Amino acid sequence: MGEPKFARPKFDTPSHPWKAARIEEEHAIQANHGLKNMREIWKAKSQLRRHRRQAMRLIGMVDTTEPHGKREMEDMLRSLHNKGLISSEATLDDILSLGTEDILNRRLQAQVYYKGLAISMKQARQFVTHGKIVIGNQKVTIPSYPLSRDEEENLTWHPSCPWVDNTEHPIRKAIDGRASTAEYGVEEEEVDPEATKEFAKEVEVAAEVAPSVKKDGGDE
């Protein structure tokens, strides 16, 4: 039963502690999202597992058009949509395609970075823990706070931050500079900076003076 005073962990730890593939994957996720420890990843995986389990149970029902099954399915889709995990036109199959990073992307730390309020995930975490981020009029200092769709519009800096109204502040200039040079959602073609006309001419001349394969007696 356990001690009533102390809540049990609401996440599952890995069944095997020393699997290289899992450890490498978790280290990559930790670096990309600026997480403090692996426990935050395990919480996201446990939450994702619960969503998938419930979706598979509803998919396996004989008839989801019955009042009870249909209401439960609609409640789940609406709940996950409000959490920002799926779109308004999503189905139960879309829930099964969610990944661990989809859960982590809804954390307050990640949303601060994605909204352009910080230049990195680590800085976003620092802003949150130091009380520089507010949702509406409420200061939130928990980086793992799950941000809903309704709260996204009210996410901003705390009014007491010195860079809110001062565009010449070093932090504000760094953030604005990153925002002005970033191209979100557009993949730019990689251009070789050395591929100039002079460089092309040098390659052409080098190709003319280079010995051929037949002259050296090599394999044709």
Image (tube, rainbow, N blue to C red):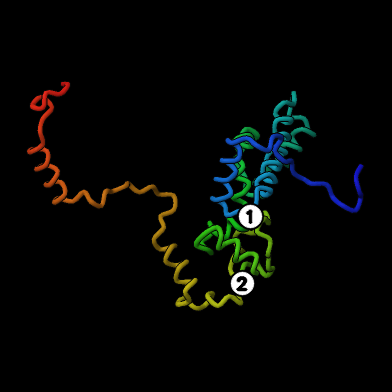
Give how far across and how far down residue 92 sits, in percent. Answer: 65, 34
Of badges 1 and 2, nearer the viewer stands: 1
Q: Distance between the residues labelled 1 and 2?
A: 23 Å
Do the CB atoms of the residues marked 1 and 2 lie less than 8 Å apart?
no
Label 1 sits on residue: 36
Q: Measuring from the top left, give residue 139's x and y in whole percent.
A: 68, 68
The residue drawn where x is 44% and y is 53% is 184
Q: Where is residue 32 in the image (x, y as percent from the top left)?
A: 54, 50
Taking 117 as reference, is 154 left or right?
Answer: right
Q: Which amino acid does label 1 sit on?
A: Lys
Say whether disc 1 or disc 2 marks the residue closer to the N-terminus. Answer: 1
- In front here: 24 or 120? 24
> Dot 1 lies on which element?
loop
Locate residue 142: give its quadrant: bottom right
Q: Residue at x 65, y 37 (%)?
A: 18
| Label 2 secondary element | loop
| Residue beneath the point at 45% across and 71% down | 173
Residue named by callout 2:
158
- Look at 53% across and 63% down and name the residue there: 118
> Which of the numbered marks, if any, corresponds to residue 136?
none
Q: Say few, some or many: other residues with alpha carbon within 10 Å of mark 1 (under 14 / 14 to 19 / 20 or more).
A: few
